Image (cartoon, grey):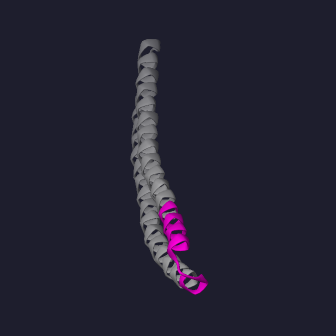
Amino acid sequence: MNTSESLKTINELTSKNVERMTSLGELNMRIFEKVAARQLDAVTLYMDHAMRVMKLATESKGYNDFFKGQVEVTKDLSERVMAESKTTIQLASEARDDYRAWFEKNLAEVSSDLRKNVATA
């Protein structure tokens, strides 16, 4: 392998590695956007709960009514948090699968490129 072929090989490997890192960055952004949306949903959930408690506090006729209402609202919040948690766990599972697929695909490509270049050397 002469110098120009070596430089060509290095340029090809560098270009492929830049493409791989770009695809990893894109994957990271997609996952970040999903996680950020989940966090926004969680904040909205708790803000909604706080508004319900405040409304309950202002509209209750007495402490017993307020306490009973608070128990109901908190029970509803707990159920909604559990549902959100299941969705978040599913998101984490999908992210794991996406990262694993990216890693396996790119590791196979790197191995193939290395085998090809070692064979020609």
Is 57 on the left or on the right of 12, as rendered? right
Magenta stretch holds residue 54: yes
Between 59 and 32, which is closer to the camera in this rendering?
59
Magenta segment, which residues? 47-65
- Name the residue located 51 percent from the left edge and 57 percent from the top edge: 43
- Name the residue located 40 percent from the left edge and 28 percent from the top edge: 120
Which image quadrant is residue 90 in?
bottom left
Residue 29, given in percent of the width and then of the height, sits at 44, 42
Total number of numbered discs in the rendering: 0
Residue 116, given in percent of the width and then of the height, sits at 39, 34
Residue 111, given in percent of the width and then of the height, sits at 44, 42
Against 81, residue 28 (above or below) is above
- Name the residue located 54 percent from the left edge and 65 percent from the top edge: 50
Residue 9, given in percent of the width and then of the height, sits at 42, 23
Look at the image and tell me whether residue 73 can be seen.
yes
Between 44 and 51, which is closer to the camera in this rendering?
51
Quarter that holds the N terminus: top left
- Name the residue located 46 percent from the left edge and 38 percent from the top edge: 25
Majority SS type along the magenta span: helix
Look at the image and tell me whether residue 1 can be seen.
no
Magenta stretch holds residue 116: no
Between 82 and 103, which is closer to the camera in this rendering?
82
Quarter that holds the C terminus: top left
In the image, farthest residue toward the top: 4
Which image quadrant is residue 4 in?
top left
In the image, farthest residue toward the right: 63
